Image (spheres, rainbow, N blue to C red):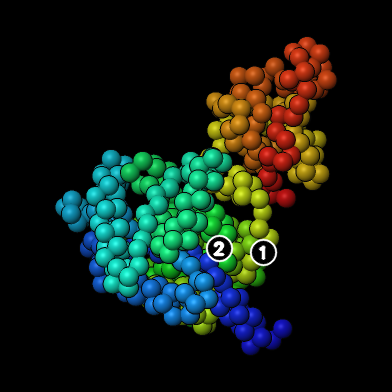
Amino acid sequence: MSERDGAAAVRDEVVAARRIVVKVGSSSLTTAAGGLDADRVDALVDVLAKFLEGAGDAEGKEIVLVSSGAIAAGLAPLGLEKRPRDLARQQAAASVGQGLLVARYTASFARYGRRVGQVLLTTDDTSRRAHYRNATRTLDQLLAMGAVPIVNENDTVATDEIRFGDNDRLAALVAHLVRADLLVLLSDVDGLYDGDPRTPGASRIAEVTGPKDLDGVSIGSAGRSGVGTGGMVTKVEAARIAAAAGVPVVLTSASRAGDALLGRPTGTYFHRTGRRSADRLLWLAHASAPRGALTLDDGAVRAVVERRTSLLPAGISAVEGEFTAGDPVELRDTEGRAVARGLVNFDAKEIPRLIGRSTRELARELGPAYEREVVHRDDLVVLHP
């Protein structure tokens, strides 16, 4: 395929996308001093609303907006000159700022006669199956009623998010959650470069067809993201997660959002590298926080990773952590490397007496309830095949 044909194929795929998740970072919404910049919010909303007003509504286009900025928006009202390092003040800023952020979006979209719906998520909402399904239903219903969902991590209670990448990974998971056709990651940098974009000679990477395309590329932070936590590393990781789940990604600057939505050449396009997987396998791999770990012997590692079999008690050599049946746990090899994650069928306190023993032996001694897998293959995802 020629370069021109490749660009045309990318454009066709972007233009054909009906349900689009757009993620915008703190640095694209705030002033240099850290306060919420109403003009920048309005500029983004102008692009999104006009896109929906144009061909969007006629073609059934839908947008879910994943927006950072709650902590940044709360800095100035609380008299904070920069993002605080301590958790308590970060959460206080998020509490004040989230209301300001949504109020600004509400007023801005109202100029176009559109309603917004606030959806605050924590890692539990994407790692526990019941919460995951409820989040999906809520987002689907908002879209069906013509509202624009505004999604953010619940900074006031989600301690992990405040150290976790400025919503980039959340955006990838939301894209899968709503079965999006496209993820657009907006930043203050107009794409991924093969070097520091501020230095002469650095070139923008137009397309990424797979992880090998980035071998040897130094991916660091760039831009003025002192008010957020996300850098280029987290954006590339989010793009990798989405692409592996069958969702293509455009990474570009907020000022080029309109071009990205219309399929014009801009930013970096990450081709999908996988097909859509079962919902819970994606959250198990990328959203769940392991509650503990099981160490596997070499034979069990081969069985789980290569043959994709269930994990039996005989293949376990050690257990750590406190967890209950149904919790996600990490499966490690003898070197301590995580090779898989799965939902465990036993409490942590039960496993020591199961280690290294056959299910038949356990059933004879402890009863038929113990003649089963520790992790069933349907509840297991390999991290590094």
Say which residue label 1 marks. 273
Disc 1 residue crowd, few under 14, some 14–19, many 20+, Cα 10 Å: some
* Residue at image point 80% right, 35% down: 299
Residue 94: % across, % down? 29, 49
Is residue 372 or residue 305 the one in the foreground? 372
The residue sitting at the top extreme is 365
Please state which amino acid type lies under the numbered disc 1: Thr
Residue 12: % across, % down? 61, 80
Residue 307: % across, % down? 81, 44
Query: Can residue 125 be spotted in the picture?
Result: yes
82 sits to left or right of 246: left
* Residue at image point 58% right, 33% down: 327
* Residue at image point 76% right, 14% down: 367
| Vertical position of residue 200 compared to residue 285: above or below | below
Please state which amino acid type lies under the numbered disc 2: Ala
Q: Nearer the viewer, mark 1 or mark 2?
A: 2
Q: Which mark is residue 180?
A: 2
| Vertical position of residue 88 compared to residue 363: above or below | below
Query: Can residue 82 be spotted in the picture?
Result: no
Dividing the picture into quarters, in which one does residue 354 lie?
A: top right
Residue 303: % across, % down? 80, 39
